[in-house]
Amino acid sequence: MNTVIAPSILSADFSRLGAEIAAVEAAGADWIHFDVMDNHFVPNLTFGPMVLKAVRPHTTMPIDVHLMVQPVDALVEGFAAAGADLISVHVEACPHLDRTLQLIRSKGKQVGVVINPATPAHALDCVLPQVDLVLLMTVNPGFAGQAFIRPVLDKVRVVRAMIDAIGLPIRLQVDGGVTPDTIGEVAAAGADTFVAGSAIFGKPDYAEAIAALRRGAAAAHTAAAMRVAV
Ligand SMILES: O=C(CO)[C@H](O)[C@H](O)COP(=O)(O)O
Ligand SMILES: [Fe+2]
């Protein structure tokens, strides 16, 4: 699967969101990652469907909405109508996860499921065939700029094997602490879709920041392919 770099606008200049999104698109980003936090499921508060609707015309890139909210279901309709392409929800926030995933699909949106660093891979067992994307958090959700939680790498390998075993084109995304220093390890472990906030919006040159991430992921994927070929 091709590598996707998804800048998280959590680290963008909120007073210029439309321009910031256009700037990362021009700099070579693939998707936009839109972090929704509710000060309940996570200890921070960001933006809702009205902000998504306002930024939607500023890009043609897919917008990947990461819902860190509880309860979830009542918000799905709003984000779907506001222009989300993919909506991801946390296992930990959804007591009726199957119903929530079906609700997202019923709105014609791609479906993502997320687990926190302390949630085991087997939490995905019963829903994997229903989703387009699995997001493994590599920080505890709530804030940008946190350090990558290295033990999650083992879980990335496990989930990669689970996805390969069922043979469906499911993306494996990681989010949190992804930088040019960490992306190689997580790509080698099997991730193909990378969220980065501070490693892009925290840098003066967005094109160079995205290129540095892409180089790190490509080097790891090439090394892995060579190991298979030998
Ligand atoms: O979901 C998130 C935090 O809960 C963000 O997407 C993530 O933290 C991005 O920021 P950074 O790349 O700086 O870690
Ligand atoms: Fe996120």
Image (spheres, grey):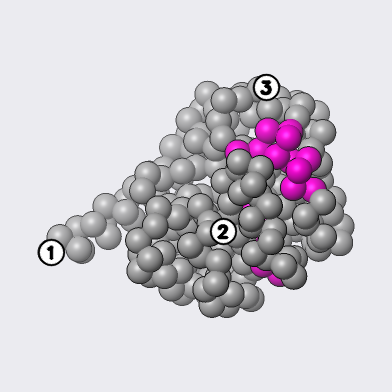
Amino acid type indicated by mark 3: Pro
Res 2 quadrant in image: top left
Relative image position of residue 81 (x, y in whole percent) = 73, 35
Within 8 Å of ligand 2, the CB of disc 3?
Answer: no
Q: Which residue is mark 2?
A: 135
Question: Magenta part of the protein: which range?
Answer: 75-92
Amino acid type indicated by mark 1: Val
Q: Which residue is mark 3?
A: 57
Dot placed on the residue nearer the N-terminal end, 2 or 3: 3
How many numbered marks appear?
A: 3
Q: Which residue is mark 1?
A: 230
Where 96 sits versus 9, above or below?
Answer: below
Q: Is residue 62 left or right of residue 116?
A: left
Residue 104 among magenta residues = no
Within 8 Å of ligand 2, the CB of disc 2?
Answer: yes
Dot placed on the residue nearer the N-terminal end, 3 or 1: 3
Res 64 quadrant in image: top right
Q: Residue furthest left?
A: 230
**Distance between the Cα atoms at labels 2 and 3?**
26 Å
Question: Do residues under tags 3 and 1 come within 8 Å of each other at their CB atoms?
Answer: no
Query: In front of the other: label 1 or label 2?
Result: 2
